[in-house]
């Protein structure tokens, strides 16, 4: 399977702390994406990192990619209660689709 | 407003009935996808479409039928609903294939089959 696996499955932190989530995958990729899902809502795209990139930033988000280890991490700095959500990594599946991991459930305590 | 909308948001039906979930996007994206989300399984692809009148199976297509007569619509039909099809269903669209561009998701249909 090319499915990504997020780690940890659940994470609980205090507001203002940093949150780090990891994703491992099994096969070579062209790029990797991270998504957020708030409770009862659809997934929202956060960031796409290409295989020739090692790090990418977007606001308080920092994504790293290590293709030699087949892993990626998502760092959320200075977390807020509004960051409470599930976070998924996604890698290209077959010719036309994405495979999603099972997600990390982040809880930020005010 | 541009976006992707799913209807209904909630549906309760009985085993053996046919049910259709609707998906409509306003971006004119070529690609559209149907996923189901279940605890412990993450998102699993049911069917996808590369363009009008072009559809293909995903990871878990059994028991589902799709059609795409217009670019903006991609309905999903459960021909004879079973309890194992109780799930949350998400529709998504994208401007290109695979993971080259983001996918944009609707807010889902929560389907319960009694």
Image: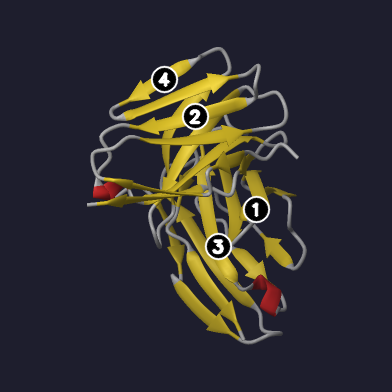
Sequence-first tag of 4 and 2: 4
The answer as to whether the residues below labels 1 and 2 share one chain is: no
Q: Name the residue under label 1.
A: B44
The answer as to whether the residues below labels 3 and 2 share one chain is: no
Q: Nearer the viewer, residue B73 or A16?
A: A16
Number of other residues with Cα within 10 Å of mark 4, as a class: few under 14, some 14 to 19, many 20 or more: some
Q: Mark 3 points at which residue?
A: B89
Number of other residues with Cα within 10 Å of mark 1, as a class: few under 14, some 14 to 19, many 20 or more: many
Number of other residues with Cα within 10 Å of mark 2, as a class: few under 14, some 14 to 19, many 20 or more: many
Residue at 65%, 48% (x, y): give it. B48
Q: In this view, does A65 lie to the left or right of A19?
A: right
Residue at 56%, 52% (x, y): give it. B70
Q: Nearer the viewer, residue A5 or A40?
A: A5
* Element class at badge 2: strand
**Residue B78 at x, y percent in the picture:** 67, 71
Judging from the image, mark 4 belongs to the subunit labelled: A
Residue at 23%, 39% (x, y): give it. A16
- Hey, which quadrant is residue A60 in on the image? top left
* Element class at badge 4: strand
Q: Do the residues labelled 3 and 2 touch (CB within 8 Å)?
A: no
Q: In this view, does B113 lie to the left or right of B55?
A: left
Judging from the image, mark 2 belongs to the subunit labelled: A
The answer as to whether the residues below labels 4 and 3 share one chain is: no
Question: How is colour applied across the structure in the image?
Answer: secondary structure
For the residues marked 4 and 2, what is the alpha-carbon distance in whole angstroms? 11 Å
Q: Mark 4 points at which residue?
A: A56
**Residue B24 at x, y percent in the picture:** 47, 56
Q: Is residue B69 visible?
A: no
Q: Name the residue under label 2.
A: A73
């Amino acid at each position: 399977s090319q499915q990504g696996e997020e780690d940890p499955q659940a994470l609980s932190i205090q507001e203002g702390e940093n949150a780090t989530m990891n994703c491992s995958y099994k096969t070579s990729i062209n790029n990797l994406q991270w998504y957020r899902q708030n409770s009862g809502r659809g997934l929202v795209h956060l960031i796409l990192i290409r295989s020739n990139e090692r790090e990418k930033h977007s606001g308080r988000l920092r994504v790293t990619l290590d293709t030699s280890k087949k892993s990626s991490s998502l760092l959320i700095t200075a977390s807020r209660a509004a960051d409470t959500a599930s976070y998924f990594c996604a890698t290209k599946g077959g010719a036309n689709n994405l495979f999603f991991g099972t997600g990390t459930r982040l809880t930020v305590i005010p | 407003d541009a976006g992707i909308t799913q209807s209904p948001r909630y549906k309760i039906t009985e085993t053996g009935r046919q049910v259709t979930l609707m998906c409509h996007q306003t971006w004119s994206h070529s690609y559209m996808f149907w996923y189901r989300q279940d605890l412990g399984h993450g998102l699993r692809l049911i069917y996808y479409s590369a363009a009008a009148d072009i559809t293909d199976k995903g990871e878990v297509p059994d028991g589902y039928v799709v059609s795409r007569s217009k670019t903006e619509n991609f309905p999903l039909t459960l021909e004879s609903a079973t309890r194992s099809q109780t799930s949350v269903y998400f529709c998504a669209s994208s401007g290109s294939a695979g993971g080259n561009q983001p996918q944009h998701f609707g807010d889902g249909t929560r389907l319960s089959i009694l």
